[in-house]
Image: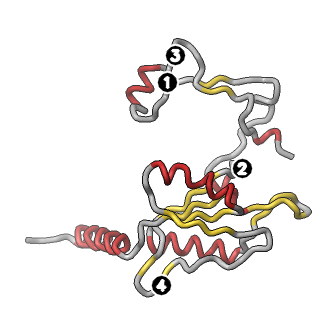
C-alpha cells in the first residue's frame, strides 16, 4: 500500500490532536473578578453538567492558577469574564492581567488545543467584531430582530426560539451598543 506524504501528515496531525485531548482534563476554568461574575459564567456550564473550577482575580491582580503539569493540561476550556477588567484607571476599564499572563493563556490554548471563551466583553476587532456605523439604535430608537418560523425550524431547531405570530424575537432598546460608549 502506497501512502502519500500528505496522507501521513494528516494521520500524524490527527494523532497529535487525539493525544492532546488525552492529556487535557475536561474541566473548564472560569476566570472572574468576583463570585457574582463567576456565577454568571457558570450558568451554561451547569446546565450541561460540565465540571468547572472558579478562580477569582481581584482588582489588585494575582498569579494565574497552574494550567498544566508534567501529566498534561488541567483544563479543557477557559472562560474569561469581562476580560478581568476593573474601572479605576485613567483610561477607564482595563484588565488586571499583564501581557505575560495573557500570553500564558494563549500559549496554553495552542499547546493543548483548548478554546478560550470571553463573555461580557465590548465587541472589538480582537474578537472579530467592529463598529460599522454610528447612529443606529440610540435611545429611544428601536430595531426589532425576528426569525421567521421556516428559518427557525430549518437552521435553529434546538435553540428554543419561540415564534408567536409576528412578534419580534428581540428588541434593541435595552441592549448594548458601541455607539453609546465614551
**Distance from Cα at disc 1 to Cα at disc 3:** 6 Å
- Residue 94 on image: x %, y %: 79, 62
- Residue 146 on image: x %, y %: 56, 23
Q: Is residue 126 above or below residue 73?
A: above
* Mark before the other along the chain sequence, 4 or 2: 4
**Distance from Cα at disc 4 to Cα at disc 1:** 46 Å
- Residue 37 on image: x %, y %: 67, 56
Q: Is residue 151 above or below residue 58?
A: above
- Residue at 74% in and 28% down: 173
Task: Work out whether residue 37 or residue 134 is closer to the camera in this orientation and state it.
Answer: 37
* Mark before the other along the chain sequence, 2 or 3: 2
The mark lying in front, picked from 2 and 3, is 3
Judged from this view, the residue extending furthest toward the bottom is 70
Mark 3 highlights which residue?
164
Which label was assigned to residue 162? 1
Judged from this view, the residue extending furthest toward the left is 1
Mark 2 highlights which residue?
122
Crowding at mark 4 (Cα within 10 Å: few <14, some 14-19, many 20+): few
Question: Is residue 88 left or right of 177 when viewed as pictured?
Answer: right
Mark 4 highlights which residue?
69
Q: Could you say whether the residue bearing mark 1 is in a helix, strand or loop?
A: loop
Q: Are marks 2 and 3 in contact (CB under 8 Å)?
A: no
Amino acid at each position: 500500500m502506497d501512502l502519500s506524504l500528505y496522507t501521513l501528515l494528516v494521520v500524524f496531525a490527527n494523532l497529535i490532536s487525539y493525544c492532546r485531548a488525552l492529556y487535557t482534563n475536561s474541566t473548564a476554568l472560569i476566570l472572574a473578578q468576583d463570585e457574582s461574575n463567576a456565577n454568571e459564567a457558570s450558568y451554561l456550564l451547569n446546565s450541561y453538567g460540565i465540571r468547572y473550577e472558579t478562580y477569582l482575580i481581584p482588582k489588585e491582580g494575582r498569579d494565574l492558577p497552574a494550567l498544566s503539569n508534567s501529566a498534561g493540561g488541567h483544563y479543557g476550556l477557559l472562560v474569561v469574564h469581562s476580560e478581568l477588567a476593573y474601572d479605576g484607571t485613567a483610561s477607564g476599564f482595563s484588565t488586571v492581567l499583564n501581557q505575560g499572563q495573557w500570553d500564558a493563556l494563549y500559549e496554553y490554548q495552542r499547546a493543548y488545543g483548548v478554546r478560550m471563551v470571553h463573555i461580557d466583553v465590548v465587541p472589538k476587532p480582537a474578537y472579530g467584531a467592529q463598529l460599522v456605523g454610528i447612529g443606529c439604535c440610540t435611545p429611544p430608537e428601536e430595531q426589532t430582530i425576528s426569525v421567521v418560523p421556516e428559518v427557525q425550524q430549518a437552521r435553529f431547531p434546538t435553540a428554543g426560539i419561540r415564534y408567536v405570530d409576528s412578534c419580534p424575537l428581540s428588541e434593541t432598546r435595552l441592549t448594548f451598543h458601541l455607539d453609546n460608549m465614551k
